[in-house]
Image: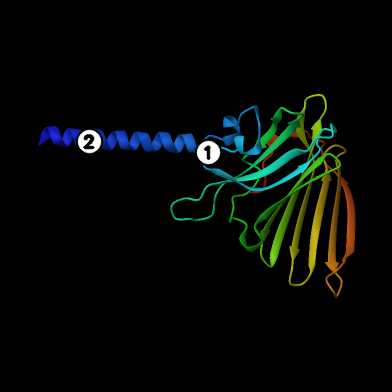
Amino acid sequence: MKLATSIQFIALLLTALLHDNSQAQQSVPFGKKLPATAQALRDFVPPGWTVENQVSGDLNGDGLADIAAVVVEGKDSAGADDRQRGLIVLLASAGKGYSLSGSNDKLLQCRGCGGIKDGVNLTIKNGVLIVSQYSGSREYSVFTWRFRLDAASQRLKMIGVDEEDADGMVGKGSTISTNLLTGQQISETYQYDQNHDRKIILSSKKGKVAKSVTLLEDAVGNQ
């Protein structure tokens, strides 16, 4: 009986240790596991993660289509949401696949955590990556971050951030737009016209904030 009890105790201890180790591995930021170069986007997606959406565009002016993608953890056994999101940005190389320009798993809130309006949009325009995160329902928020590739370091740096808070029922809201390169900030309030087709600016105020440089990897969103 004593031997059986000891064996059971050891088995339980090993199970607990394996579980703790598994949890520790899962908590490691996925950016530390991504390859430096690979042939396709799928090769950069961590095991157990999937691509939620992606966009192509030229980020470094070489005429090739680079890729930005939002990836999300795979569903758990219950099929629940509340799954972590991450951002991966890849630079294309002619005939050589892609190289990892940057990644982040702290910027975007988890999938399903944003309520009815939960979602993330990606755009590449004039060499700038624009990431917009939506959350809320009648009262909602939109956070938008802008990143541009620094030619010297070949790193993506945040150059601006916008925040919008609005009430969709009454058609009123406010925005704060910050240029991190110049330190200029513009705060506005607005309401939509009767047809909800056009924003009418009610007030606008300019201000100054400290200039800052934040790399994509270090950016932290509104969780």
The structure residue drawn at horizontal position 89% and vertical position 63%, both measured from the top left corner, is: 201
Q: How far across and how far down the image is residue 49, in percent?
A: 55, 43
Toward the viewer: 196 or 176? Answer: 196
Residue 187 drawn above or below residue 23? below
| Sequence-first disc among 1 and 2 | 2
Looking at the picture, tell me which residue is in the foreground, 208 or 28.
28
Q: Distance between the Cα atoms at labels 1 and 2?
A: 33 Å
- Left or right relative to 209: residue 109: left
Residue projecting furthest to the left: 1
Q: Nearer the viewer, mark 1 or mark 2?
A: 1
Q: Residues within 10 Å of mark 1 (few under 14, many from 20)?
A: few
Percent position of residue 124, x then y = 80, 44
Query: Height in image: 212 above or below 172?
Result: above
Provide the residue designation for mark 2: 9
The residue type indicated by label 2 comes to Phe
Numbered tag placed on residue 47 in the rendering: 1
